[in-house]
Image (cartoon, rainbow, N blue to C red):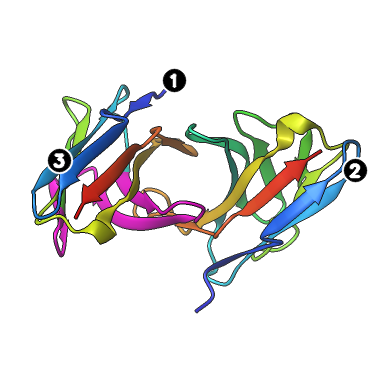
Amino acid sequence: KQEVTQIPAALSVPEGENLVLNCSFTDSAIYNLQWFRQDPGKGLTSLLLIQSSQREQTSGRLNASLDKSSGRSTLYIAASQPGDSATYLCAVPIFGNEKLTFGTGTRLTIIP
Amino acid sequence: NAGVTQTPKFRILKIGQSMTLQCTQDMNHNYMYWYRQDPGMGLKLIYYSVGAGITDKGEVPNGYNVSRSTTEDFPLRLELAAPSQTSVYFCASSYRTETYGYTFGSGTRLTVV
């Protein structure tokens, strides 16, 4: 069974700092890995999708990396802003299995 | 460009009542999913569908039913609501999971009292 872990569960950093969020998964047979953002009381917004053949994916100040062999992904946020405050979740589907398994998320607070 | 639309956004049910949560997508996606999210917890898969007429159970299917008569619609039925079903419900869709990501609806917040 695929297990997805995100550490830390919560993180507070001052505005302007660069930061890294971590995601670990136990089964490396994945199609891709997706990072989502969830604002309080809202739905999930897709941020980045990394295919299993890729190592990195970038969108603006966000950069996600994927290391299948070690079962890890990181989400790097550059020059953090208060608007980045949200919960960030990673999720993976598994080969031959259409279900998406989610981590429990990292709640990020950017301090002005 | 509606994406995934869920209705209603909020609902309060009494114990034992039934209701249907609606989910519609206009992206011609094959795959559709229902998740529930409890406070401080991750998302748990309730049911999913890989195409019209095909549905399958996820991790927490008890107390729920689904149908998929069209590509666009994937309603979730709650029979005999219980307090344990108080949660936020999310519908999602995807074209092909190996190359495409998921699109989520904005959620339905359900309280059973």
The structure residue drawn at horizontal position 38% and vertical position 33%, both measured from the top left corner, is A103
Indicate the amino acid at tag 3: Val
> Is B13 placed above or below B101 here?
above
Left or right: B86, with B106 as reference point: right
Q: Position of residue A69 (x, y in %)?
A: 16, 27
- The quadrant of the rendering that contains the N terminus of chain A is top left
Q: Which residue is mark 1?
A: A1
Magenta segment main secondary structure: strand
Labels 2 and 3 touching (C-beta < 8 A): no
- How far apart marks 2 and 3 lie (CA) works out to 45 Å
Circle on res. A20: 3
- In terms of depth relative to the viewer, which is nearer, B64 or B99? B64
* Residue A61 vs residue B104, the one in the foreground: A61
Secondary structure under badge 3? strand
State which mark lies toward you, 3 or 1: 3
Which residue type does callout 2 highlight? Gln
Tag 2–tag 1 contact (CB < 8 Å): no
Q: Is residue A40 left or right of B65 when viewed as pictured?
A: left
